[in-house]
Image (spheres, rainbow, N blue to C red):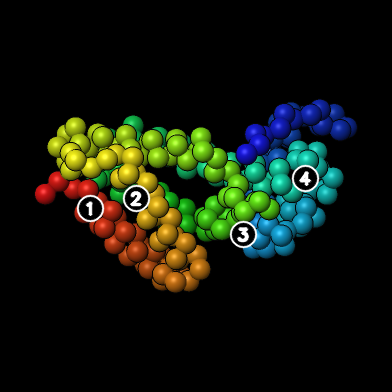
Amino acid sequence: MTSSRQHHAAPGGASDDIEPEKRRAILHAAVHVFADKGYHGCRIADVARAAHVAYGLVYHYFRNKDELLENVLAEQWAIFTNALAAIGAGPGSAADKIAGIFGFVFDVYKTAPSAIRVLLLTRTPQGLRAGSTRETFERAVGLVADIVRQGQSRGELQPEADPTIAATSLLGGMELVLSGMVIGLVPGTSEAEVDRVRRQAVDVAIGGLRKG
């Protein structure tokens, strides 16, 4: 995964506050274009048109389509891991926090399904999911594992459960449920259906960890 490039001086003396705004507009548009067209069907011109910017401005921030995709996915993963950190540091039982993780992700699915679709289905030309480096994956798993440890220390969750295995199971199960909705295998075309799926997924996830 490549990191975001440093901003160069804008041509024509554009102000610094316009620069990040244009870059954000490009990234936001790219989420929708990648979700709609996929990596191979997406063109830089499509992103520029969706962002309402000049074609050349996209190349001002990103060397090519690969780097644009990497930045799109890296940003989405950062949003997710920051949410995990905030939920983990917040109040509530371990079960409340696990439910909060599912609630956050399923709310994103309802309000910004393109972001979920890009995260789940977009692959780089090498076949790997962009933005999901080992470091990113370890951070996400570690944050959820910390929530499991909190629950174990309070006597809320099974003490014999391995926190890392529990965390990967929770995240993996959530990913598969969301993938099922994205491809139409799991009903999720209405808010009521999404909420029903979320409740059942949470019940299954917590039920397997809750101390009997």
Which amino acid, mark 1?
Answer: Gly
- Dot 3 amino acid type: Ala
Sequence-earlier tag: 2 or 1:
2
Residue shown at the point (25%, 57%) measured from the top left: 203
Q: Which of the two labelled residues, at mark 4 and mark 3, occupies the earlier sequence position? A: 3
Q: Answer few, some or many: residues within 10 Å of disc 2's Cα (few below 14, many 20 plus, some between 14 and 19).
A: some
Vertical position of residue 106 compared to residue 76: above or below? below
Please say if the residues under marks 2 and 1 sit with CB atoms less than 8 Å apart.
yes
Query: Which disc number belongs to residue 35?
Result: 3
The reply to whether residue 95 is in sight is yes
Disc 2 target residue: 169
The residues tagged by marks 3 and 1 sit, at their Cα atoms, a distance apart of 33 Å
Of the two numbered discs 3 and 2 in the rendering, the one whose residue sits closer to the viewer: 2
Where disc 1 sits, the SS reads: loop
Three-letter amino acid code at the position of disc 4 = Asn
* Classed neighbour count for the residue bearing mark 3: other residues with Cα under 10 Å, few (<14), some (14–19), many (≥20): many
Give the spatial CA distance, label 2 vs label 4: 35 Å
Q: What amino acid type should be assigned to the residue bearing mark 2?
A: Ser
